[in-house]
Amino acid sequence: MKRWTVVVLVVTAVFLVGVPSESLAKTEIHFWHAMGGQLGETVNELVKQFNQSQAEYEVKALNKGTYPEVLTGAIAAYRQKNPPHIVQMFDVGTQTMLMSGAIHPIFQLMKEQEIPINWGDFIKPVTGYYSKDGNLYSMPFNSSSPILYYNKDAFKKAGLSADKPPATWKEVGEASKKIIAAGAAKCGFTTSWPSWTMLENTFPWHDQPFATNQNGYTGLDTKLLINGEFGVKHIGQLAAWQKEGVYSYGGRMGQPDPKFINGDCAMLIQSSAVIGGFKKSLKFEWATGQLPHWGPPYKKQNAIVGGGTLWVMKGNKSTDYKGVAQFMRFIAEPHQQMWWSVTTGYVPVTQTAIKNLEAGYHFKKNPEQWTALSQLSAKPTANSQGHRLGNFIQIREAIESEMENIFAGKKTAREGLDAAVAKGNDILKEFAAANKQ
Amino acid sequence: MKRAVFKNRGLPYLLVLPQIAVTLVFFFWPAVESLRLSFFKTSPFGDKTFFVGLENFQKLLVSPEYYQSIVNTFVFAFGVSAIALGAGLLVAALATQKVRGLAAYRTAVLWPYGIAPPIAGIIFLFIFHPSYGVLPYWLGFVTTYEFNWLLKGWVAMTLVIIATAWTHVGYNIAFFLAGLLAIPASVLEAASVDGAGSIRRFRSIIFPLLSPITFYLLVVNLIFSFFGSFGVIHAVTQGGPGRATEIMVFKAYNDGFIGLNLGSSAAQSVLLMIVVIALTALQFRFVEKRVIYS
């Protein structure tokens, strides 16, 4: 027994001290991401292609869990002065990263490494979201927007046209009621990422302001505007539908997906990112439509990009950054752009990639991959360029907590949204105070 | 009690040194660090830090969410303790019966304690999740009641209480079992001869003799619920719906690691520490007097 203890201690000690590593021929580039399942496999494949394409650098991709976990991990690593080179961060982490002082802006990196990238080729809703003063700060990687998925079998069973998804919320309600009455599904629709799909995107989609200061782009003293007439109308309708069974709240993030996958709900509003997974796993006929709209008097604007971008962190050996820049160029190339988009369901983010895909009739053959892109085609307005809110992860949580209170019938739409705005404004004030110059 | 006598005066200190070192490094250091952080406001990446005095505490004490998390914590802790102690005692009592395969049965009832709380949470999700759980699916055949704890706060709370109690009941069973087996059979037989039924025997003999263990377990269960119950809630409800299951330790984690508000998170940890220290001190002072130690 004692001898074993000694052995264990010695082994542990050796590991703690660190096994001296042999000098590696290739420079390692560490890339932390939040892509699990099918998406994670695709990232690994992309990285493998890059590693095989040249001999100097070896990108090591590591799935560090959810986006907030990746962020927390990157912060801890940065504070211990051992950050990964590249960190994938989701849209709502943008302001936190921008203000962190820990990042190396992508436009600057490429300039320094003298690897030109035609930034003008990137589509506007993407560059608009991740730029500051006209310069792109992080590398567009996985961009998506929320779309409507519908179960064609259930639509047919309810006597609805399986080729015409409901385009307005009114039609969503009517179709749902017919589907439930026909016994084609238990509920009409459910929504993944509730705050992202039902507020953060629904507001710009109707050209409505989400927050002051052009959704936070022009200052830190920002306040939320989601408790206005439009927000109350939209969330109030969802709450009424929840009561009737038309809408079925299914939790946060991707938790509601199973309701659609197992046929309980005939429609799902979720990121286009799940297309790749759905193609493999869904056991019924399905198709997609644009995010539903309320129609006039509201203008149909554009959805905002979700998903993530790649941030380059400061604090590594200066010679490593050449490899980082080469990897960035690699993923920006049309071929990789197209392959990534076709495999996953994320939208291609350069004009060239889109044109090439069109030339190959890709979108004709795969209309579901056109849906998300079509929502991003309008020229963004001040209300629809994106959201730049500090501590947005926490704000999203505050909003979703209140959405739950509303859908549970504990609060009216107005009471709940008022509470979400009050809490969200507190969080914004905290962020502004912690980041005052 | 036998007193150990050491000839070498330094030896006893040397022997307790590892324990003291571990306590200092893993308990006192982080605690002091939390206390220090609680007076600061820090940007997420730690590049900007301001001293703010008691502002973090003051903000918490006017925040309704914080009070809700305190109420949630007490409901949760007493719920978990009551169920884990009650079920633990019941199962332990059953495990003292003379049945075939007793050893295997006793081993089996201890198993849940070997399951890590997050795993237990995932298991409960697979059983109870409204979208893909087995139980709501079966319930759908017999009733129209919607077992939707994604919106019903009290159902969610009940669920995490039961899940947490389940992970902890094995620990209680082990202690109760040891306590029950230590009660001399002769005393119980004498009581039987005097005409005491099984309930009377339990109330007048077994329960008082078990009271030191029960007291110890109560303290441990409460502290476990306050501090160690994070895994299940993280896996099952993430504090939702609408903060209904957001207990203090989860809120501290969430505000610190998801919300990146380290100052507030540190302040919450300090308050949580104070609550637990006070609770333990109170229990030792008032409850201990009524506990019979043999």
Image: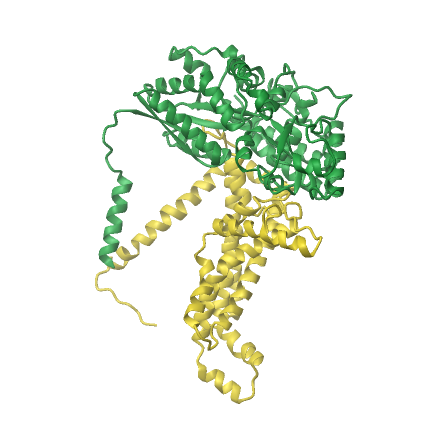
Chain colours: A green, B yellow
Quadrant for the N terminus of chain A, please: bottom left
| Quadrant of residue A162 within the rendered picture | top right
Please identify the residue farthest to the bottom as the structure is shown. Answer: B193
Instruction: Tell me: residue B100, above or below residue A227.
Output: below
Left or right of B120, for residue B149: right
Left or right of B1, for residue A424: right
| Quadrant of residue A84 within the rendered picture | top left
Residue B280 vs residue B75, the one in the foreground:
B75
Residue A420 vs residue A66, the one in the foreground:
A66
Which residue appears at 53% of the width and 58% of the height?
B165
Q: Is residue A99 visible?
A: no
Instruction: Tell me: residue A274, above or below residue A220.
Output: below
Which residue appears at 70% of the width and 36% of the height?
A156
Where residue B22 sits: x, y (%)? 35, 50
Residue A366 vs residue B228, the one in the foreground:
A366
Left or right of A120, for residue A50: left
Q: Is residue B223 visible?
A: yes
| Quadrant of residue B200 within the rendered picture | bottom right
Left or right of A389, for residue B110: left
Residue B149 vs residue B294, the one in the foreground:
B149
Where residue A71 sits: x, y (%)? 47, 32
Where residue B21 sits: x, y (%)? 33, 49
